[in-house]
Image (cartoon, rainbow, N blue to C red):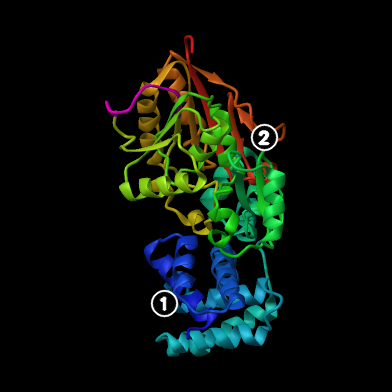
Amino acid sequence: MKSARQTAFEILNKINRSGSYSNLTIDSMLSGSDLKEVDASLVSALVYGVLERTVTLDHCLSRHLKQPVRKLKPQVLTALRMGAYQLLFMDKIPPSAAVNESVTLVRANGCAFAARLTNAVLRAVSREGLVLPDESDPDQYLSVKYSFPLWLVRLWRGCYGEDNAEGIMAACTGRPPLTVRVNTQRTTAPQLKQRLKEEGVEAAPAPCENALNLGKCGSVEKLVSFQKGLFHVQDAASQLCAAALDPQPGDTVLDLCSAPGGKAFTAAQLMHDEGRIICCDIHSHRLALIKEGANRLGLRSIDVALNDACTISRQLPMAQRVLCDVPCSGLGIIRRKPEIRFKDPGEIDKLPKTQYNILNNSANYVMQGGRLVYSTCALNPAENEAVAQRFLQEHDDFVAVEPAVGGEDSYRSAHTLTLMPHRNQTDGFFIAVFERRGKR
């Protein structure tokens, strides 16, 4: 049987090699393992911890290396990062265990030549502890302190100000809450909270109506309340996005980039499941997941359609409500997928063109008096405000509407809303609301 550290080592190497998402890779590896719950928890802690703290770890390691960390063999670098993370951020693991287990990893994975190096460097890290750069260079200091690449530190400081930038970075450390949306077609928040308590799960109110944050519950899919369709997993930011759409009973709603369907499920409940919601996606297997979720929740208003949002379809109807939740950089969900911080900024710069194209196409389906919502889970004005402003400049038949969600602490600019984890206790999220001139 593989040890917890060996499993974490393999997951980290796979993520670094293929760019796969941490949550999916962890779930895949652990589902096929026979690790005990305590060992599985260690795997998750090591993987998420190393990914969250990579910049910090590399800074501390580099102080005791004669070569840049990037020139190390990938397996050796992974073992060093794992060891340094245990030494610097995991109080319950003895330093000797952190060092010795890391040496064992390099020996067991074809890198015995680096055993002495691993031992020496980690012992030096243990002696010296966490050392941060001088604060005279704020960008470098914040980059190492919160483990973010310099380009992202500079982006957030420049766009949102120093306090917000540091708040966002601080809020991206540690595991975020598991937030669920109460299926108001079948239960209420107090009833669900009591039901979860009977299943051994504590639930607390989340920053959104009919939303709960769950305590430790293991695999949520195993809960009877989940199987009976009493809730679906969805961050409060996405729930607020569905609320900003303001769907009414009897409406036709288009969700043009729908998978996995959470916003459509919430919209259906806001409509009392009266009307029609067409969930679109370019991949048929993702549409199957939406249908499966709707069936579990007992939502009859949900339909699915295979559709490419980058083109205009004659098969889709006009609608009173259109949701355009576009593919984005994901810079607002780094606390859930810490590896996103290492995306290529050059690739991110290409996104607004596609995002605008989808938004532009989406406008064709909006009835007079209807509402169009543009959203991303990005904290990046180029993907957010810039796209929304361009849309208004080129569509004089639409007007901006202040999103009536988010509360007083929300960051607002030019009739748009940006949710931030440190201000709203949600994922980072952007919402712009437009209405087509004319009667509904």
> Does 379 appear above or below 107?
above
> Does 182 appear above or below 373?
below
Residue 11 makes an appearance in the image: yes
Asked whether 316 falls inside the magenta stretch, the response is yes
Of labels 2 and 1, earlier in sequence is 1
From the top left corner, tell me how far across and down residue 215 is, in percent: 68, 59
Instruction: Write the residue at 55% across / 35% down.
Output: 269
* Amino acid type shown at disc 2: Ser
Q: Which residue is mark 2?
A: 410
From the top left corner, tell me how far across and down residue 265 is, in percent: 51, 40
Q: Which residues are magenta?
A: 312-322
Q: Residues within 10 Å of mark 2 (few under 14, many from 20)?
A: some
* Amino acid type shown at disc 1: Lys
Q: Which residue is mark 1?
A: 73
SS label for mark 1: loop
Residue 159, picture quadrant:
top right
SS label for mark 2: loop
Instruction: Write the residue at 45% across / 65% down.
Output: 25
**SS majority, magenta:** loop
Badge count: 2
Q: Nearer the viewer, mark 2 or mark 1?
A: 2
Nearer-the-camera pick, 76 or 131: 76
Q: Residues within 10 Å of mark 1 (few under 14, many from 20)?
A: few
Nearer-the-camera pick, 175 or 351: 175
